[in-house]
Amino acid sequence: MESLYTKYRPQTFSDVVGQVPVVSTLERAVLNQTLSHAYLFCGPRGTGKTTMARILAKALVCEEGPGVLPDGTCEQCRSVAEGIHPDVAEIDAASRTKVGEVREEIISKVDFAPVLGRSKVYIVDEVHMLSTAAFNALLKTLEEPPAHVTFIFCTTDPQKIPTTVLSRLQKFTFSPLSDADIRGRLETICQGEGYRAEPEALDLVVRHAKGGMRDAISALEQLAVFGDGNVSADIARDLLGQSSEDVLVRLVEGLAARDTGELFGVVAEVVAGGRDLQQLVAELTLRVRDLFVVKSIGLLPALVAATADAGAELEREAALFEDADRLSRILLSLSDAEYALKRGGDQRIALEIALVRMARPEGDLTLESLNERMNRLEAQMVGDVASAPAAPRAASASAKPVAAAAPAPTPEPKPVPAPKPAPPSAPASAPAPRAPEPPASRAQAPAVPASAPMAPAPTPASVGNGRDAAWAEVVASLPPNEASLLDASRVQADDGHLLIIEVDDDSPFTLGILRRPDVLQELEDACAPIFGKRRVDVVPSRDQKPHAPAPSTRPSAPATPRQGFRAPAPASAPAPAPAPRPRQAPVAPSRAAAAPAPVNPPVPTPPPAPQPGPTPAAPAVGDDEFSSILSGLQNTFGSVEVLSVGTDAPEDEVPGDAGFDEEYEFGYDDGFVEEPLDD
C-alpha cells in the first residue's frame, strides 16, 4: 500500500508548497535554458529537497524539449517519478561513502551518453556522508563534467561538505514550511481521502511536525488509521504524546505565582498519564516563547500564530509576569532542562528541579537568579522610596560623616607619676627650671578625639555635607540597578583627579558589579557634570578607622604606634658633651593648632604658674613648627589626625631630660593605605 506522503508528493513546480524563492529561480533557469551543471539542495528534513531534485530532473529529460516546464504526463517524466529512468540515477551517499563506490557509480559512467533523454542526472542524497577521499575524487568531475551531465546534491548538514566542493555548486537553502502551508496541505489530503478531521486535531499535527511536511502527512495518516477515518483532538493527544491546553495553562500560572506545589502536581499528573516529558518541555517552551513576545512587543499575528481566543488567553497569561526579563530567564532554564532530559537519567527529577529553579530563584545561584531576586527587592522597596522625602539619599549619605565627627568620650585623665631623678653623671649646672605643666594637660594630650576641628585642606570637589549631597545627586541620576547598589555609599576621598567611593556592602557580588568597566564608565559620566572630570574607584567600607588613642599608662616609655608618621624634631647641632642644652621653656602645643585655619604661628601663651611638686615635662615642638608640619600633611594627604605623642628617649631615660624631643604620630585616610604610614 502506498503511503500518503508518497501518494501526494508534488510532481511539478506548481505543486510544490512553499519554498517560493527556490521554485521561482529554478523555473526561470529552465525557461531561459541557463541551468548549471551542479546544484546543492540543503535544509531540514521533510522540506522538499529530493522532490525538487526529481522535478528538476524531469525538466532536463522531458520530451517536450528544453525551455519548457515539465507537466509530468510524458513517458520520460513518468519514468522519473517511478524511479526507473535509466538516465536519472539516485544514489544514497549514506550507504555508499567510500571512494571506490563513488568511482564505480559516478566517475566510471559519467562519460557515457544518455540512453533515452537529453541529459544524465545524478541525484546524490545525504551527500555530506561521503568520505574526504570520495569528495576529492569528485572534484575534477564536478569542475569540468561532460556537457550532458548534471549533478544534484541533497543534504541536511552542508557544513560537513568541503569548501572545495561547495565552490563548484549552486546552493539553494530550503526553509521549514510555515504552519499555514502545512495545514492547507493536510486539509487537501483529508478532502481527497475522505477523512473527518477536527480543526484542533490538525493544529496538534501541525505543531508536532515542526515545519516538516513529511512528518505532518505521516502523523495524519497514523491518526486516520487509528480513528477509522476520524481525526479527533483526543486521539491526536494520545498518539502524538502532546499535552492538553489545561496542562500548559496550569504550568504557566504556577510559574507566574511561584507555586511549587501546583507545579509538582502537574508533573505528577503528566507522568501518571504516560505523557512524554520531553514533549511537555518542548510545548511549554513554545508557550513561554509566545508569552515573551506578547510581553515584549504585544500580540503581533506575524510573530504569534493564534486565533482571537488564543491570543486573548496569551495576553492574560503574559500579564501574570512582572516583566519580559523573567520570561527570558524561564526560556533559558527550559532550554537547559530540555538538554538535561535528553542527556539521560531520571527525567521527572530533572524537570521538577528545573521548575523549582524557575519559580524560586533563591534556590539557584546563577547570576540570572540573583538579578531576579534583586529586582524583587527593588519592587518591594518602591512604596517606601515613593513615600520618603525628596532627597533621602543625600540625608543618609551625609549622616554617616556627621556621626563620625561626633567627639568620642574622653577617658578620665590619670596623673603622670613623678619622673626619675637625674643620673649622677648629670652636670651640676642644670638649666633654669621650666614652668611645669599640669599633669592633666599632659595626660590628655594624646586623647584628642578624632572629631577635633581638623578639617582637611579643600579639594577640587566640595567637602563635608556639600560633597555628600553632590554624591547623592549623582546616585539619583543613575539607573535603578546601579543606584540600588550605591544607596549606602559615600565619597571617601577626592583629589581632583580620582574620586573614591566607599560602599558598606562589601560582598564580592556587589563589588564585582560596581567595578565592571562599563559601570565605572557610567559613574564617571554621571559625576562629570557635578564633580568635574574624575576617574572613579569603588572600595569596601573600612569598619575600623584610626581614632585617638587613650591616655598612656606608661609615661616614661615612648609611644610605639603600629604605623604612623613621625614629625621630625627641630634640627640642632649635636652636643659634644652630655651636658644639657640650655633651652627656653616651650609651651605645649595647643590642640587648636590642628584646625586648618591657623597657617601663621599662634601667639604663645605665658607659662602656667608653678605648682607644688613640680613635674618636669618633655620639651615640645614649637607651635609654629607643629602648625607647619600639620598644614603640610593636610595639603598632601587630605585628612590628618594625631594618633599619639611620645618622646625619642629610651625607656630607662627620663622623658624630659635635655637632649630628647617630643615625637608626634600622625595618621591619614585616603582610601589607598589601610593604616597610617610610618615616616
Image: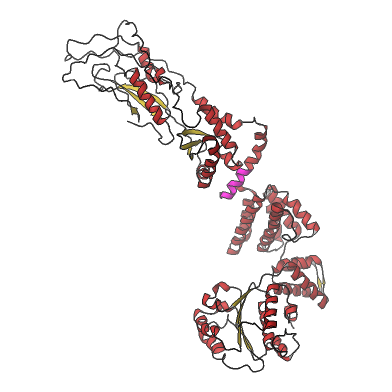
Which residue is at the front of the view, 423 or 359?
Answer: 423
x 56%, y 30%: residue: 469
- Compared with 270, 654 (above or below) is above
Which residue is at the front of the view, 104 or 591?
Answer: 591
Which residue is at the front of the view, 397 or 381?
Answer: 397
x 21%, y 22%: residue: 573
Q: Which residues are magenta?
A: 363-375
Quick check: can you spot residue 55? no
- Compared with 250, 644 (above or below) is above
Residue 316: percent from left, percent from top: 76, 51
- Quarter location, residue 305: bottom right
Magenta stretch, overall SS: helix
Question: With 676 as the anchor, is 243 left or right in this view?
Answer: right
x 73%, y 77%: residue: 16
Residue 499: percent from left, percent from top: 48, 37
Q: Quadrant of the N terminus?
A: bottom right
Quick check: can you spot residue 259? yes
Question: With 129 as the anchor, is 440 left or right in this view?
Answer: left
Residue 476: percent from left, percent from top: 60, 36
